[in-house]
Image (cartoon, rainbow, N blue to C red):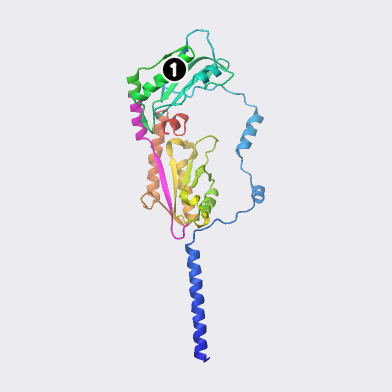
Amino acid sequence: MSNLQIGLAIAGGVILAGVVAHGAWSARRNAPRQAQPEPSRDSVDALARDPVFGDFEHDSQSMNLPPTARRSAMDSLIDVIATVALDSAHAQVSGEAAIAAMPATRRAGTKPFSIEGYNLATLSWELPVPGHRYGGFQAGVQLANRSGALNEIEYSEFVVKTQAFADAINATPEFPEMLEEVARARELDQFASAHDAQLGFTIRARNASWSPGYIQQNSARLGFVAGVIPGRMVLPASAPGLAPVLVLSFDSQAALAEDPAQSAIREVTLHLDVAQVNRSENPFERMREVAASLAQSMDGVVTDDNGQLLSAPTMDGIGVELRTLYDTLEHRELAAGSPLARRLFS
């Protein structure tokens, strides 16, 4: 073999190796980014330990706080309330009897329906409980929710269900005037519709796509935990039992794939349901911080639903509008994150 042939063979080998290497580099570059190994739990625990729900429960028990009488969950601000008086002034109804008389469903149309009894031992309103005795009842139906205002048909269903319950326990209901309540429902629904803000940011990949595990790992570092629905993570509120501060979601089909590591995801959505979260949680400020952190750590950009980049001045303007919204809700006694607001905006 001549020197020329040997040189050509070597050059060909170098070119082939380069092609193979470039192909491998391109495949690696375009493959979904994967989660990286995390430090062991023991090493993390040795550095710091955050309180968990179990700690909270233990502290509450050690403080030996006495139980307090619970107010009625119903409120005339957002509910129609009918009194259900027992026919005898000294009559009592057991919790078992009240539960047996309850309607099969707890809704009137699309509106939540509820019956509470006045507990003679604790002198407070509560949902009927076996073993307790009650000296009176009240029934309520919500005036409005995100399905709309209470209408005449739903009000009539509320009346029928309440009357059936009253008949079963030998009681007499007294209902507010229907037209007035329906008018109240419409006014409340108009207010709620005009002040129902739900914000969404989208974090889009600049270059390489993301695997579900990569998204979950980066989100977990910011305090998110897995939600019930695949492809959903939530940032918990500061107290248990409250709505999450933020919700992060991505393609559920990718999360359910046989090999999620091969799923290519190019965007995630960050969502804030304003009325459901107390302003003391600083939800919008945290939303901005989370979006910026995810964009930085995952090499992405923050946009609106239409793919337009969200600038700092635009976000500042949103923040100003939200402060006005919080003030308006509080003035109406429907502060964001309060039990009444969470029921109305649901």
Q: Position of residue 81 (x, y in %)?
A: 42, 20
- What residue is pinned by disc 1? 164
- Is 187 placed left or right of 202 in the picture? left
**Is residue 251 placed above or below 109 in the rendered structure?**
below
Q: Residue at x 42, y 50 (%)?
A: 202
- Judge the density around disc 1: few (<14), some (14-19), many (≥20) Cα neighbours within 10 Å: some
**Is residue 96 placed above or below 33 in the rendered structure?**
above
Q: Position of residue 36 (x, y in %)?
A: 57, 57
Residues shaded magenta: 183-209
In the foreground, 35 or 316: 35
Inspect the image, locate mark 1, and give the three-letter code of the amino acid beneath it. Ala
Quarter holding residue 321: top left
Q: Residue at x 45, y 32 (%)?
A: 342
Q: Quadrant of the C terminus?
A: top left
> In this orientation, does residue 44 appear?
yes
Under tag 1, what secondary structure? Answer: helix
* Residue 190 on the magenta segment: yes
- Is 78 placed left or right of 90 in the picture? left
* Residue 200 on the magenta segment: yes
Quarter holding residue 82: top left
Q: Residue at x 51, y 84 (%)?
A: 9
> In this orientation, does residue 77 appear?
no
In the foreground, 273 or 102: 102
